[in-house]
Amino acid sequence: MADWINKPPENLSSSILRCVDAETAHEYLVIPVGEEAEVLVVAVEDPDDFAMYDRLRFVLNRELRLVGLARSELIMAVWRFYGAALER
């Protein structure tokens, strides 16, 4: 069973935020929330979604641990830390 968090951290270091670029954060609706040793901790809507895990691991090219966060919190966090989505 995956871990869940109630809210993303109030402040995230620029080094953590750089681990996930804005386009990826918006496309997959994810936010990096920390790092444990060499493992990036990423908040997602469904931390038990193995397909999402595989896609993110490929895109980010690193080991991950997914934690759950409510969709509404994810949307607010992506907006706050990465700004509005870019038009394609």
Image (cartoon, helix red, strand yellow):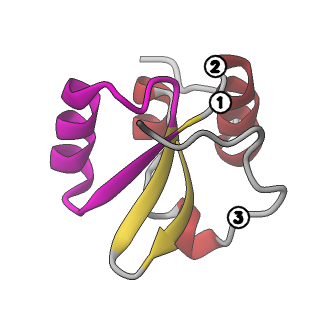
Q: Residue at x 33, y 78 (%)?
A: 38
Gap between marks 2 and 1, in whole Å? 5 Å
Q: In x, y percent, where is residue 63?
A: 25, 62
Q: Residue at x 48, y 38 (%)?
A: 25
For label 1, the residue is 74
Crowding at label 3, few (<14), some or many (≥20) Cα neighbours within 10 Å? some
Please indicate whether residue 24 sits to the left or right of residue 30 in the image.
Answer: left
Q: Residue at x 42, y 25 (%)?
A: 27
Crowding at label 1, few (<14), some or many (≥20) Cα neighbours within 10 Å? many
Q: Residue at x 72, y 38 (%)?
A: 77
Magenta residue span:
44-67
Whether the magenta-drawn stretch holds residue 62 is answered as yes
- Check disc 3 and give the amino acid type: Leu
For label 3, the residue is 12
Gap between marks 2 and 3, in whole Å? 19 Å
Whether the magenta-drawn stretch holds residue 24 is answered as no
Of the image marks 3 and 1, the number of the one nearer the N terminus: 3
Circle on res. 71: 2
